[in-house]
Image: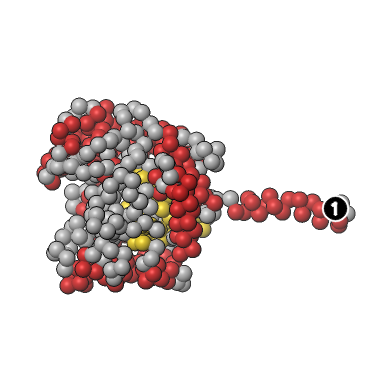
Amino acid sequence: MTQRCLYILLAAIMPFIAAAQQRQQYVAVKNGQFVVNNKPWYFIGTNYWYGGLLAQGKDAEKGKARLRKELDFLKAQGVTNLRVLAGSEGHGLVNGVERVKPVLQPEHGVYNKEWMEGLDYLLYEMGKRQMYAVLFLSNNWEWSGGFLQYLNWNGQLTDSAMKSKMNWGDLRDNTSRFYHCTPCQEDYRKQVEYIITHVNRYTKRSYRNEPAIMAWELANEPRPMRPAAVDAYKQWTAATAAYIKTLDGNHLITLGTEGIMGTEESADLFREVHTPAQVDYLTLHIWPKNWSWFKDTAIAASLPVVKEKAVSYIQTHAAIAQQLKKPLVVEEFGLPRNGHAFEPSAAVTLRNELFASIFGVWKQSRTQGGPVAGCNFWAFGGTARPIEGQTFWKEGNDFMGDPPQEEQGLNTVFDSDVSTWKLIRSFIHSK
């Protein structure tokens, strides 16, 4: 072959080589670490649960434009991992509050194709930016239907009971019944199979072959809810993880737990449910407000204790992850703005301090090759803003980080929170 021919051949194949080098790789677990292309991968990400909802409805084009803008913004900050809602169920009030709309399965056994196309577009755009999604397949809580809706569809929870506001005891009693309801679990599996085998309209790949997906999560914060349900909970988590592996051998699987707080405050139970080989990594959530680590709006006075408890909570779970030789992700954590304000103009110095403490544990783990591999703060609100004089979400409002049952702006990190983004960048780009 002449030198000229060689040059021509190289010129012809170089674009294909470059494309192969840029092709997105699946996230895997090796030696207790996340790896991408056989290299350790540590990330700071966010919760973007509504990402699949933006490219839907009458304003789909407007939503797509917002989505592209927000993904570009996140990528510029160094955020490459997004935790997203993939499975939602039913319609109307549940536990006395509005649920997210639209939903994937509005009626029993009826799926919304448009809903999936919205998720298709999100994954398509994420793939172009080399970003990864963790998709949770249902919900322990009411704001997207979840386990309560499956119970209602199968005659285990009346319409009136589901719609009414339950006290904490009743909510625990009702939700825990999911783990003893065989037809409920069968319906859940049907939805899971529908999602995983769905073919993306834009990439032409089924979801099980979609590299922009990092992992499937059984549900958002699945809890036994009552001690009597613990054995059934253990059976369900193990069996469901194994079932998903039969559908999809490319992607990781995790449960989506809050950690010890969500497993009847038992470290042993937390360890046990994450032991099966089909469960690839561990998760924990940190909610100082919900867990009464501070009183009322007294965030500043309690902040030293809040930070100390948060770091200790992560370290306790990191030790378990180390024993199991699996990565750990701190996949939800949040704090209201100073003074418990909701307005984007309110200061976020206290929140930033908590974030810095959590990111500090992550940074140390990254430096030492430890198990704390990812942090997904709750939650990204992008360009959305709370409506003045309106506390809770109503259908037609812009989505932001706070679900419908929470005050809009409560835990949301907006694109305008300059100091928080500066903090995030400083940790992502630190050595």
Where residue 41 appears, as percent x and y from the top left, is: 46, 59
Q: Quadrant of residue 53?
A: top left
- Does any portion of residue 24 appear in the rendered image? yes
- Furthest residue to the right? 2
Question: Looking at the image, how many numbered discs can be counted on the residues?
Answer: 1
Task: Work out whether residue 381 or residue 84 is closer to the camera in this orientation and state it.
Answer: 381
Residue occupied by mark 1: 5
Where residue 279 appears, as percent x and y from the top left, is: 36, 45
Task: Work out whether residue 212 or residue 99 is closer to the camera in this orientation and state it.
Answer: 99
Where residue 315 appears, as percent x and y from the top left, is: 28, 63
Residue name at image x 46 percent, y 72 percent: 431
Q: Quadrant of residue 327?
A: bottom left
Q: Classify residue 24 as left or right of residue 193.
A: right
Q: Classify residue 1 as left or right of residue 61.
A: right
Residue name at image x 27 percent, y 50 percent: 393
Q: Is residue 4 above or below residue 219?
A: below
Q: Classify residue 153 as left or right of residue 196.
A: left
Q: Is residue 37 above or below residue 151?
A: below
- Does any portion of residue 310 appear in the rendered image? no
Where residue 349 appears, as percent x and y from the top left, is: 29, 72
Q: Classify residue 341 as left or right of residue 324.
A: left
Residue name at image x 45 percent, y 64 percent: 77
The local secondary structure at tag 1 comes to helix
Q: How is the image coloured?
A: secondary structure
Q: Badge 1: how crowded within 10 Å, few (<14), some, or many (20+)?
A: few
Q: Is residue 57 above or below residue 5?
A: above
The kind of residue tagged 1 is Cys
Q: Quadrant of residue 322?
A: bottom left
Residue name at image x 45 percent, y 71 percent: 430
Task: Work out whether residue 294 or residue 104 is closer to the camera in this orientation and state it.
Answer: 104
